Image: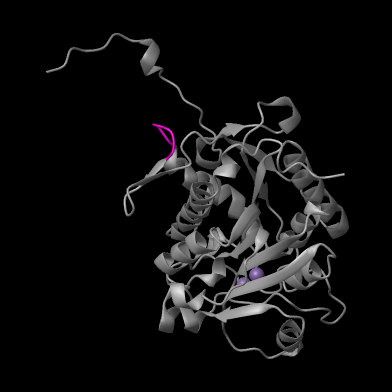
Amino acid sequence: MAEKQPFGQADQAPVRPGWATFFGSTPCLNLGQCSPPQIAFLGVPLDATTNDRPGSRAGPGAIREASMRWQPEEGGWLDVETGQTLLQGVSLADAGDVDIRVVDLAENFQRITRAVQTILQAGAFPVLVGGDHAITFPAVRAFAPRPLWVVHFDAHLDFTDNYRGVRYSHDNPLRRVRELPFVRGIVSLGVRGMLTYTPPYWEARELGVVMVPAAQFHRRGVEAALKGLPPLGDFYVSVDIDVLDPAVAPGTGYPEPGGLSYPQLKEALQRVATLGRPVGMDLTEVSPGFDPSGRTARTAAYLLLDFLGAAWATHPSLQKQQGALRQRG
Ligand code: MN
Ligand code: MN
């Protein structure tokens, strides 16, 4: 039997932080004053524009909490399926939550854009965790004037122009993003469902949105489904958690049957990472109140690691990107 350790051993401190950060990363609310990280996580607890079932404002907290299960102890994460160690030596920081105000959407969008600009100016790769999907527009506009594509995983097109006077809800973000002059194109992956209001579908087709329906992933497999995608150059990836099947991710406000499995989405994220150079990402629409099991938030934490791990493995230039993402001009 091992000898009893005396109290107060230096390597066995009796307390540890009781607060959560994304994957246990260093908290840093003012990136200008910290050792600049390569990846900065930013919570965006806004769900003011959800048209059906709210609750995704609790997404950042739930995903942060879930991600604490996977604090790296040896540097990086070993993906047991591939034997590959992900994100070894890559510095991460938790940049806190955007301070969302109650009803002023324009002000909240400004705050989101400014928070992303701060991350870019620090030379870090921004990872936004929502929140509802409206946050993608103020996030992407922070990249101006860098030309980029947007790769969008979602059951829905989110391409509504103006429905009964509403232009900035979680139905509109990809349409608003398409209007940004530096956005070169949009790829929407995993779309499905029945529409009762169809103009957004036809307009997305007219405006050149590249669509791959969920059924293509199921029938042909991920590799074949993604075969026709154009080379992307710089791109931003936006994941609406409802691209997953509701059986996998029930914790979301607008579930649609027939979604992707976790392995399908993981493989798709890994392949997309090779089609161009990622410059930022978001993950939205996790609404933990609909999922007492907590599996949606846990899966969301995995998806962040899956994409970031593939991005850093594919693009050695991201390893030394410090300052490379700084805005031009
Ligand atoms: Mn969406
Ligand atoms: Mn959706």
In the image, residue 264 above or below residue 234? below
- Count numbered badges in the picture: 0
Q: Is residue 101 visible?
A: no
Task: Left or right? Give the position of 257 relative to 32.
Answer: left
The picture places residue 248, in percent across and down from the top left corner, at 43, 68
Residue 216 vs 48, above or below: the answer is: below
Q: Horizontal placement of 293 versus 211: left or right?
A: left
The colour mode here is one colour
Look at the image and tell me whether residue 57 can be seen: yes
Q: Position of residue 285 (x, y in %)?
A: 61, 63
The image quarter containing residue 277 is bottom right
> Is-magenta flag for residue 235?
no
Q: Which residues are magenta?
A: 72-76
38 or 328: nearer the viewer: 328
Q: In the image, ligand 1 is in what quadrant?
A: bottom right
Residue at the spot 56% in from the left edge and 38% down from the top edge: 21
Quadrant, the N terminus: top left
Q: Residue furthest left?
A: 1
Q: Nearer the viewer, residue 79 or 164?
A: 79
**In the image, residue 51 lies at what x, y percent?**
71, 73
Residue found 81% across the figure and 46% down from its top: 114
**Is residue 72 shown above or below 229?**
above
Quarter containing the C terminus: top right
Which residue sits at x=77%, y=44%? 115
What type of secondary structure mainly makes up the magenta span?
A: loop
Q: Quadrant of residue 233?
A: bottom right
Along the horizontal axis of the image, is 7 left or right of 305? left
Asked which quadrant contains residue 196, the reply is: bottom right
Pinpoint residue 64: horizontal percent, then vertical percent.
54, 45
